[in-house]
Amino acid sequence: MKNDLASFNWVAAAADVVPDAAVQNGTRPDLTLAITRGASRLLTDMGFALVPEFTLPNGRRADLAGLSRKGRIVIVEVKSCREDFTADAKWPSYLEYCDQFYFATDTRFPAGLLPEGEGRIVADAYGGAIIADAEVRTLAGSRRKAMTLSFARQAAFRLTV
């Protein structure tokens, strides 16, 4: 599930997507959107169906949730800057609802802030690369069934609204 970061020429350009002056309330909205788009493109290329802003059973919303052809569930939390990461302590509550968890950042994000064992995707608006594999947690069958049903329902409701 790992991609070679060196094979992506666009990664070096990701540092200039949004100037530091664009930081608003601890986040960079344009950069967040670009990272989300790139991570989405990567996961789609890997065969995942995606639902952005996926509501979990605990009421939290994951930035991206992916469902593989084999039913594996991946959650991605997008972080645009240090302040975005340090102000948000809810990501551990996502772990019980996925087989793998990734942070998606740009190239300038200080990787030392991220906890060990969780995956990292580096992305910009054009694509992404997995540069740290996520720990594999296997969901219990009943949790997987409930999450898959929730995934299907949330995706279907977005098509009908």
Image (cartoon, rainbow, N blue to C red):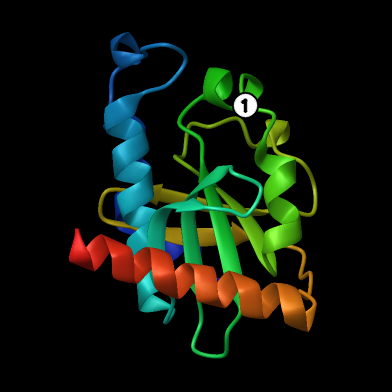
- Depth check: give the residue in front, 5 or 81: 81
- Please state if 26 lies on the left or on the right of 34 as rendered: right
Q: Is residue 102 left or right of residue 150?
A: right
* Residue at x 30% of width, y 9% of height: 21
Say whether residue 146 is left or right of residue 10: right
- Residue 3 seen in render: no
Q: Nearer the viewer, residue 161 or 104?
A: 161
Secondary structure category for the residue under label 1: loop
Which quadrant does the C terminus fall into? bottom left
Question: For this rendering, which residue is in front, 57 or 71?
Answer: 57
Please tell me how crowded label 1 is: few (under 14), some (14-19), or many (20+) other residues with Cα within 10 Å.
Answer: few
**In the rendered image, which quarter is residue 126 located in?**
bottom left
At x 80%, y 77%, the residue is 140
Residue plotted at (31% across, 71% down): 156
- In this rendering, the answer to whether 101 lies above or below 72 is above
Residue type at numbered disc 1: Asp
- Mark 1, residue position: 88
Q: Position of residue 112 (x, y in %)?
A: 71, 33
Residue 53 picture location, percent across and down: 42, 49
On the image, the x and y values in percent for residue 65 come to 49, 61
Q: Give the mark count.
A: 1
Residue 153, placed above or below residue 134 = below
- From this view, report whether residue 72 is shown above or below residue 4: below
